[in-house]
Amino acid sequence: MDKKIIRARNLRVNQTPQELKLWNLLRARKFHNLKFRRQYHIGNYIVDFICREKKIIIEIDGGQHNFDENVLYDNNRTEFLHSKGYKVIRFWNNDIDNNLEGVYAEIEKFL
């Protein structure tokens, strides 16, 4: 089986608490009746959440994304996703933990 598929499955099974909170908001067409998928691979990347219909990708970042090498990786990744026509929205873990309503409102702005 393809390594990317196995990795995506493992990421779905081992969601962070913040991913689970956001997934509960997005899943089963609960958000504006849009179909979201989680841990979806595009090219060489696996994105946290994607709505292909609206070309929206949502990423949840933890503290490790502050390190220089991860910032560079994330910037290259975002550039690639933009080149495929996707809008990338990023939230920090603490945004999900402390302001889920604000996260919801921010996602709505991209519809």
Image (cartoon, grey):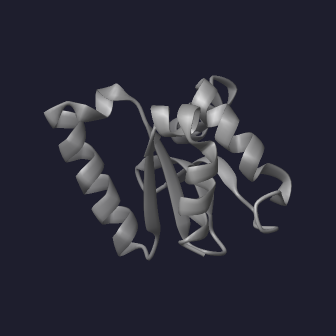
Residue 87 in sight in this render: yes
Out of 64 and 103, give the one closest to the viewer.
103
Out of 53 and 96, give the one closest to the viewer.
96
**Residue drawn where x is 43% and y is 48% of the image:** 45
**Residue drawn where x is 65% and y is 46% of the image:** 38
- Left or right, 73 with respect to 49, comes to left
**Residue drawn where x is 61% and y is 67% of the image:** 108
Q: How many marks?
A: 0
Out of 4 and 102, give the one closest to the viewer.
102
- Left or right, 65 with respect to 85, comes to left
Give above or below for 65 relative to 88: above
- Left or right, 110 with respect to 72, comes to right
Q: Quadrant of residue 6?
A: top right
The quarter of the picture where the C terminus appears is bottom right
Percent across and percent down for residue 42 are: 49, 57
Residue 15 in sight in this render: no
- Left or right, 101 with respect to 109, comes to right
**Residue drawn where x is 76% and y is 67% of the image:** 34
Out of 67 and 45, give the one closest to the viewer.
67
Percent across and percent down for residue 75 are: 24, 53
The quarter of the picture where the N terminus appears is top right
Percent across and percent down for residue 59 are: 48, 48
